Every structure is written in structure tokens, then in C-alpha cells.
């Protein structure tokens, strides 16, 4: 690996807040500079802005839950990310698949399924909701309070190009809390 490549990788590690300590004097100087924090903030702002444009419901929910900035920062620090917003959005939404908050999981799976279906995926996607997804999306669109979890039922949503209007959602009774 050339010195230039080592420095470029080192700079990326610094911006993504990983790695170190560095043996290269230049990288040590950058690591201790005031300007590095500004570069980190600018890089993160641009990526967050890109996600907001592609994943509007997920990002709005994360902001409502006061965890948007932390989740986005952790995602970018821990993952190699594409410069293409479409690929970036898919990876970000996919990273929320195992999130502890059921509503964050559901809304991110919903947006991920929509993006994939609109891109021509032949797969059908199924998302389980603990509350009415229409009301969730409306609340995120208008800024109103999110609807509460509905006990005794669940909503099974299917998304696919083979479905009428691309989305079908059914309310189903449940005898236990499936979303714990």
C-alpha cells in the first residue's frame, strides 16, 4: 500500500471516528486538530440530509423519538457507505431491521419495501404493525401525535408489484402481544 493510500484511509478513519493511534505525523496532527470535528459534522450533515430526502417517514419518526442524530452517526461511523443516495438509503433502512423499537422497525421496513418495489423488485414484502399504519404515516406527514399501539390486533401489510395499488393491509385479531 502506498503512503498516499495509507493517508487517505487514515483520513477516512478520522472522519468516521474510528482507528488510531496513528504512526503518521500528519494523521496525528489532523487527529488533534479543531477542524476535524467540523469536517465530521459537515460530512454527517450531508449524509443525514440525503437520508431525509429518500427516507422521509423513517427520519421523521427517528426525530420524533429523539434518536435521529445518534442512529445516523452510528450508522456512518460503523459502515462503508455508498456515495449514491439510492444505495445509501437502502443500506440505512436495512440497518434498522433489528431495532429495539417496533415502530422504527416497521416504518423502516415499509420504506425499504417501497423503494425496492418502485425499483422493480419482483418480491412481495410483508410488514407487521402494532398499530394502524395509515394513521402512523398521516401523523408523520402532518407532525401530529403518533397513534398508540393497539392491543388485541395487528396489521399485516403486503407490498409488491403484483398487488392492486402495490399495497394491501389487513387488520387481524391477535390473542397475545406479538410485538414485545
Image: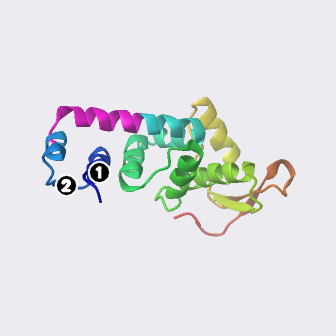
Instruction: State the image quarter where residue 169 is shown.
Output: bottom right
Q: Do the residues labelled 2 and 1 touch (CB within 8 Å)?
A: yes
In the displayed structure, would residue 131 be above or below residue 46?
below
Residue at the spot x=15%, y=55% of the render?
21
The residue to which callout 2 is attached is 20
Judging depth in this view, the residue of 55 and 104 nearest the camera is: 55
Task: Please tell me whether residue 35 belongs to the stretch shown in magenta.
Answer: yes
Circle 2: element type: loop
Residue at the spot x=69%, y=49% of the render?
114
Residue 117: numbered disc: none
Whichever of labels 2 and 1 marks the residue nearer the N terminus, that label is 1
Circle 1: element type: helix
The residue to which callout 1 is attached is 13
User: Where in the figure is residue 62, as x and y percent of width and height?
Assistant: 48, 43
Farthest-out residue, top: 142
Q: Which segment did they paint magenta?
A: 32-45
Q: Main secondary structure of the magenta part?
A: helix
The reply, left or right, for residue 174 in relation to residue 46 is: right
For the residue carrying disc 1, how many other residues have a C-alpha within 10 Å: few (<14), some (14-19), or many (20+)? some
Amino acid at each position: 500500500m502506498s503512503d498516499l493510500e495509507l493517508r487517505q484511509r487514515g483520513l477516512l478513519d478520522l472522519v468516521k471516528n474510528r482507528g488510531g493511534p496513528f504512526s503518521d505525523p500528519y494523521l496525528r496532527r489532523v487527529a488533534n486538530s479543531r477542524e476535524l470535528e467540523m469536517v465530521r459534522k459537515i460530512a454527517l450533515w450531508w449524509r443525514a440530509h440525503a437520508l431525509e430526502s429518500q427516507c422521509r417517514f423513517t427520519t421523521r419518526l427517528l426525530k420524533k423519538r429523539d434518536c435521529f442524530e445518534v442512529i445516523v452517526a452510528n450508522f456512518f461511523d460503523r459502515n462503508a457507505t455508498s456515495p449514491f443516495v439510492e444505495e445509501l438509503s437502502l443500506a440505512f433502512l436495512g440497518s434498522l431491521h433489528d431495532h429495539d423499537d417496533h415502530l422504527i422497525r416497521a416504518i423502516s421496513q415499509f420504506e425499504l419495501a417501497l423503494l425496492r418495489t418502485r425499483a422493480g423488485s419482483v418480491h412481495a414484502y410483508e410488514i407487521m404493525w402494532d398499530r394502524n399504519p395509515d394513521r402512523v404515516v398521516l401523523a408523520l406527514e402532518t407532525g401530529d401525535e403518533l397513534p398508540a399501539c393497539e392491543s388485541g390486533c395487528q396489521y399485516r401489510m403486503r407490498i409488491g408489484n403484483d398487488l392492486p395499488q402495490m399495497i394491501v393491509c389487513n387488520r387481524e385479531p391477535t390473542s397475545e402481544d406479538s410485538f414485545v
